[in-house]
Amino acid sequence: MQRWIVIGGVVLFLLLGGGAFGFYQYRQNKVDQSYLPIPFNPEATEAQKQDSIKNVREHLLTDKILDVVAKDCGAKDFWKLASDADALAEVKKRAFVESATDTNQAGLKYPSMRIGFRGKRKEFSMLSKLAERWGKDLRFEQKSRTDDF
């Protein structure tokens, strides 16, 4: 009788442990993304927003910039790819530039442009590194405050 209780306990432990591990693996393989939200001027028209997104895509989605980003972040080693060309293809496949509405810390919504990378949840550290590094290649001309006077 005691033997059956022990066997039942072991089976129950294995079932619950396997279920928890399966749920954890399921969650880690869900689709995730890491991006930098760049706010638009609230008074900008939709055409101006689309034009800005087009210009950023032309500037940032080049092989030259993405190759440097991939090498700086170690994408080839992280994804265990054979060559730098494969790493560039993988980074290029995951990169995105899109228009969206984000929420700030006060809960207010604002129009923004998202530049970042898509992947799996377990790759979030690499996706964040890639997005941060890619954001450094984006430069805006800022108007000086003295121009208004």
Image (tube, rainbow, N blue to C red):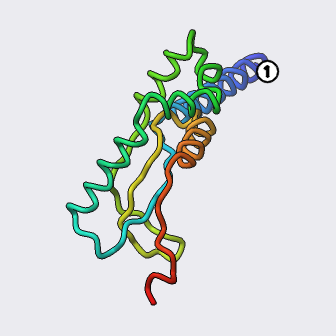
Q: Secondary structure at mark 1?
A: helix
The furthest residue to the left? 47
The furthest residue to the top? 82
Judging by the rendered image, the residue that carries numbered circle 1 is 2
Compared to 90, does 47 lie above or below? below
Image quadrant holding the C terminus, namely bottom left
Residue at 52% across, 27% down: 67
> Percent from the top left, x then y, of residue 2?
79, 21
Compared to 17, does 141 lie above or below? below
Residue at 56% across, 27% down: 22
In-image side of 103 versus 22 (left or right)? left
Dot 1 alpha-carbon crowd within 10 angstroms: few under 14, some 14 to 19, many 20 or more: few
> Percent from the top left, x then y, of residue 110?
38, 70
The furthest residue to the right? 2
Q: Nearer the viewer, residue 9 or 65?
A: 65
Q: Nearer the viewer, residue 136 or 112?
A: 136
Number of numbered markers: 1
Image quadrant holding the N terminus, namely top right
Residue at 28% across, 70% down: 44
Residue 31, quarter of picture: top left
> Percent from the top left, x then y, of residue 51?
26, 55
Which kind of residue does numbered mark 1 sit on?
Gln
Compared to 6, does 59 lie above or below? below
In-image side of 47 versus 91 (left or right)? left
In-image side of 116 versus 110 (left or right)? right
In-image side of 86 versus 62 (left or right)? right
